[in-house]
Image: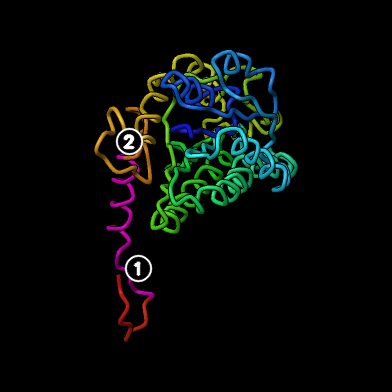
Amino acid sequence: MPGNVWFIAGASSGFGRAIALEALARGDKVAAASRDPPKMSSLEDAGAVILKLDVTSDETVIMDTMQKVVDAYGRITHAVNAAGYLLEGVIEAASQDEVHRIVATNVLGTATVTRCALRFLRPQGFGVIANFGSLASWEGGLAYGYYSATKWAVSGFTESLNLECRPLGIAAVVIEPGYFRTEVLNEGGGHRLVTREQLLAEYADAGLARQKELVVQMDNNQPGDVNKGARVIVDVLTQTGVASGREIPVRLVLGSDAMQGIKNKIKATETLLKEWEDVIVSTDYDDATLKG
């Protein structure tokens, strides 16, 4: 039976592809899944098994896809949910269908892949499930409210998952990168622009036009190196290299910008709690014994 066997959903680009290539370079087995298999030819050339999969598919389809991996390699040790995309634009501008689609992919798809993976990992008593959050899991931002909402959901979901499955020998970790040079901001690279021009003037005071300029400037200038990030991710999920001798954390933050952004968020939250403490605690019963 082989050592590490990776099932990676969303492997056609970005972190999914980079993680697959890094794992393959270490001699691990990789099953790379995506809605668009032709985009994974480089992974196939490197030795990956290529699978067609839309994470919004019915659960039975995802189970059947994972079973193919187990049939080929005997087991799955690492399940990675890297499928997702960015929906840009003010909250009011998005259509109901656009909102449903991003939630279906970024949240419900992650949840379904996770449930299916557990049905293979739980009986064997070990394994790792890695889901993708973001710096946007920590802070909302202008023009990416729905993306941020999905990433907050994934991070909360994964923290809860970890509490449930860690006692079973299964680690759950949410990977929270800052800005990395992936295709997500490229034209046609998963970036979805839904801002309606007629709303621009009304939202101008919120800085929407400036935000659009910053996105263009950021593209291909992000500080994060996706290959370095993938190297760290594989180290951490296999407890080797920089993570040798360390327990797999429930949250894996990547990038100096993510670290600083989270520090700023924590500081702002502590300030808010201090300023509003008298109001916050005033809602308890006078005789309450269960207090924080």
User: What residue is drawn where x is 49% and y is 20%?
Assistant: 21
Work out how far the residue at label 2 is from the one at label 1, CA to CA, in angstroms. 44 Å
Q: Image height check: is 114 above or below 68?
A: below
**Residue 87: quadrant of the picture:** top right
- Percent of width and height locating residue 79: 52, 39
Label 1: how many residues lie within 10 Å, few (<14), some (14-19) or many (20+)? few
44 relative position to 154: left or right:
right
- Percent of width and height locating residue 158: 47, 49
- Residue at the limit of the structure toward the left, as seen here: 245
Q: Which residue is mark 2?
A: 239
**Residue 84: quadrant of the picture:** top right
254 relative position to 140: left or right:
left
Foreground: 229 or 187? 229
Foreground: 255 or 145? 255
Does dot 1 land on a helix, a strand or a loop?
helix
- Amino acid type of the residue that numbered disc 1 sits on in the rendered structure: Val
Label 2: how many residues lie within 10 Å, few (<14), some (14-19) or many (20+)? some
- Residue 279 numbered tag: 1
Specify start and end residues of the magenta stretch as a single range: 263-283
